[in-house]
Amino acid sequence: MENSNHFGKVYLIGAGPGDPGLLTVRGKSILEKADVVAYDRLVSPGVLSLCNPKAKMVDVGKMPTHHKVKQSEINKLLVKFALEMPGATVARLKGGDPFVFGRGGEEALELVAAGVEFEVVPGVTSAIAVPAYAGIPVSHRGIATSFHIITGHEKEVDSRKSEVGSDSVILSEVRSTKSKDPSQNLSLDFENLAKCQGTLIFLMGIANMDFIARRLIECGKDPKTPLAFIEKGTTPNQRTVMATLETAGETIVRENVTAPAITIMGGVVELGKTLAWKKNLPLSGKRLVVTRAAKQSSGITARLTALGAEVIETPMIETRSLEKPQTVFHPERSTVGAESKDPGLQGSVDFKSLANFDILAFTSTNGVESFFKQLFAAGYDVRVLAGKKIASVGKITEKMLLEYGIRCDYVPEGHTGEGLGLLLRDVVDKCEHVILSEERSSESKDLVESRILLLQGNLADDTLLKLLPKATRWTVYETLPVAELPDWKREAIASADAIVFASSSAVENFSRLSSVGQSPFSRLSFCIGRLTEATARKHGFETVTSDETTMDSLVKKIVEYYTMGENA
């Protein structure tokens, strides 16, 4: 741990406005090792999915009209974690930036008073990022040379006022009380704000915006000033509603504008009609749950995110390399060139026995990584594969093998286990024909087939062994189901548009976990491979399946579905 103190260290981390891609590199690195994460309501599930899966997750989220945990209690909670967990990394995860109306200063003061070490990790503030995602720059040459951030946060303190100067950034806090009269709730310097030529950005002020707009007009601001309300900025549910200062109140009611939302006023708002880039992305507004194993999901997550989707990484299985491969002896057959001929048994492998095989068949990227990890750990390198033929179940596994400097000799067109088995059986038949013509040996087929080695996981089915009954299978990794889903992830899944499955085991475990206390969720699924599709249908999912068993094909199918309609 970074903290050598006898207390834990607290990190006040800005999570940004919603899009997990806007989390800083520093923030991500801390969350990945955090022992405790105390997070707010507005922190997106995409950001939460980046946290250490073993971290204690504490929801301290505050609703507009109801505080789950009062700020004073949050302050004390951070101190408590630090005092009771020596050397721990305690992450306080806050929407936006901790020091831009995030009350991070109050938390920091409490930590100082308790003698707890802390660090502030700035975040991207919604005041700038949300307009940018709506195509509205907060400043623009010839239109606005300053921008001013105002919040309607409810707190009984004197408002902070700053002089309005060109090219300045002004942070003002709205003073609010329990009064139902907005004029008693706000103590803004409306006269100076009305004269300001820069962009005005109001955070958390929707409830008072009708009054704010009227007061600005009374103080001389042009009623025709362009205005935009941006709901749920940088998330799949982002919505921009245009208005003017004089129509602000009626627009909020007519369009049912709700929090969380920001209000931006000024000439720059007009640019949003031309520069709104986010809504043009093909998957904009879609929340997709990716169930692939964590270490494999980054590729598809990056692709889907770049296309506008919000991705919730929710691995259903975990894979772990075995220390040594295990030979699995198939019932009802004897194994030539292996350690034992007893059916149903398994035992550790000595890599010297690789000499007994001519063809090595890999059925997954996990199998490739695990095999080479074990091979190198045993003191060997790729030279032991000299002269051997290499088979891959599909293009993804083939690409992984190439990273180890190994080119494949056999890859089935269908990219399935059955396709691989049929291809290798055809290879065996051709070899048998050659040997029979030369040696007339009745045992030639068995000898050729027995020199095929299948490198698979513990949950691999018997498809290949049924097609190649004399082949040998080594189990090089094990697949373990994820045991549970945290509450925040269940909530995210409940609001998702679709679930993405890359394996049958992921479908099985998702169906098992989601049936335990799960709110209704989307029954639409995107599947890779026909076996995954069949399993998803068995569990009641509507399925859209990729044409090929590759991630590129799956992403293409997802885009086609949403851009061409449900019947694509």
Image (cartoon, helix red, strand yellow):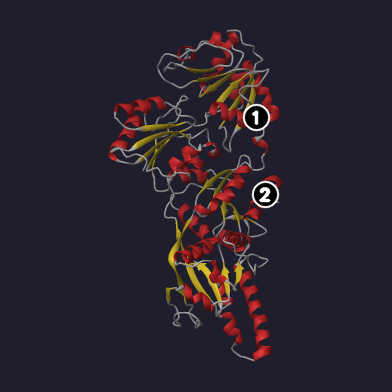
Where, by quadrant of the figure, is residue 116 drawn?
top left
Q: Earlier in the sequence, mark 2 or mark 1?
A: 1
Q: Quadrant of residue 466?
A: bottom right
Residue at 64% of width from left, 11% of height from top? Answer: 222
Closer to the camera in the image, 377 or 287: 377
Residue depth check, mark 2 versus mark 1: number of the one nearer the observer: 1
Position in image of residue 71 (x %, y %): 37, 28
Q: Amino acid at mark 2?
A: Tyr
| In the displayed structure image, the side of residue 238 where residue 293 appears, left or right | left
Q: Quadrant of residue 216?
A: top right
Q: Please determine whether, in this image, residue 299 is positioned above or below residue 322.
A: above
Residue marked by disc 2? 561
* Whole-percent x, y for residue 324 in the image: 43, 68
SS state under label 1: loop
> Can residue 458 be seen in the rendering of this structure?
no
Residue 170: x and y in percent read 52, 17
Residue matched to label 1: 135
Q: Amino acid at mark 1?
A: Gly
Image-based side of 15 in relation to 541, left or right: left
| SS for callout 2 | helix
